[in-house]
Amino acid sequence: MAYVISDDCISCGTCVDECPVGAISEGASHYEIDPDSCVECGTCAGACPNEAISLPE
Ligand code: SF4
């Protein structure tokens, strides 16, 4: 299960360079994670200044 970016994303771009597999890109309204590329390392979640990245419940 891939991490997801919520509407709390403020599009700062901090997470993009943190992802080791390049799964994060700018989406229509905020940044998005490609679920097929994400390896669930959690690095991006720790880097987000707005706590917008998490595993879906
Ligand atoms: Fe990339 Fe890891 Fe975040 Fe998945 S959990 S999007 S692999 S940084």
Image (cartoon, helix red, strand yellow):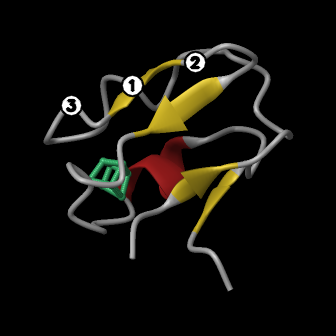
Question: Ligand 1 within 8 A of label 3's CB?
Answer: yes
Residue under circle 3? 22
Look at discs 1 and 2 and give the one toward the viewer. 2
In the image, what residue occupies the spot 69% across and 22% down?
A: 30
Checking the image for residue 2, the label placed there is none
Q: Residue at x 20, y 63 (%)?
A: 39
Name the amino acid type tagged 2: Gly
Q: Is residue 24 left or right of residue 26?
A: left
Residue 42: give x, y in percent of width and height: 39, 64
Q: Earlier in the sequence, mark 1 or mark 2?
A: 1
28 over 15 or under it: above or below: above
> Does 10 sit left or right of 57 as displayed?
right
Tags 1 and 3 touching, CB below 8 Å: no
Q: Amino acid at mark 1?
A: Val
Q: Label 1, on which residue?
A: 16
Q: Earlier in the sequence, mark 2 or mark 3?
A: 3
| Residue at x 35% of width, y 42% of height | 34
Q: Is residue 28 above or below residue 16?
A: above
